[in-house]
Image: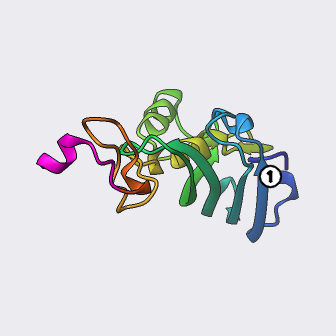
Amino acid sequence: MTGFVLDLATLHPGFDRVEAESSASDVGLSQTEWREPVRGKFTVDRSGERVSVRGSVQSRAHLECVRCLREFDLPLDVPLEVYAERSGSTSREEQKQLERDDYMLFHDGRRLDLRESVREALLLELPITPYCREDCPGLCPSCGAELALGPCGCTAASND
């Protein structure tokens, strides 16, 4: 197995435990926002040509708080579930439809590539408005002082 590409020949029929790790760029994430490796722990169930992967993916996203504009790291632990069948088991059109609807992946009998699924799972877990902490007071709307360091003392703050 290389990163998040499972080598199906090394998996036993039935259940296997698999751990994976790769750089953020290997799964298609920006190295500036994802500075730590992406790790995954999975239970893989291989039954004939069908493969199901269940587990979780962990990493840390480097974000900017929307309130105070400080940079911070957000640890993520995201569940991942993937179902795959061998290519050619259904018509080409049906395969495209199933992949487009995110119901199933298809493998070539040798490898199952999980990189795109891992990338999507991590990106979907990111908050739309990231906060360094839930009670972050942000910046003063008048002078721009960081209110987490204490009151700014400007006249706009005293008028509020």
Quadrant of the rendered image containing residue 19: bottom right
Q: For this rendering, which residue is in front, 103 or 148?
A: 148
Residue extending farthest top = 93
Q: For this rendering, which residue is in front, 74 or 98?
A: 74
Residue 43, compared with residue 143, is above or below; it is below
Q: Position of residue 24 (x, y in %)?
A: 70, 40
Is any atom of residue 96 visible in this view? yes
Residue at (46, 51) in percent of width and height:
125
Q: Position of residue 49 (x, y in %)?
A: 68, 53
**How is the structure coloured here?**
rainbow
Is any atom of residue 52 visible in this view? no
Q: For this rendering, which residue is in front, 34 or 20?
A: 34
Residue located beneath label 1 in the image: 8
Instruction: Examine the structure image and report whether residue 29 is included in the region drawn in magenta.
Output: no
Q: Position of residue 73 (x, y in %)?
A: 58, 52
* Residue type for callout 1: Leu
Residue at (26, 42) in percent of width and height:
154
- Magenta-drawn segment: 151-160
Q: Position of residue 30 (x, y in %)?
A: 64, 32
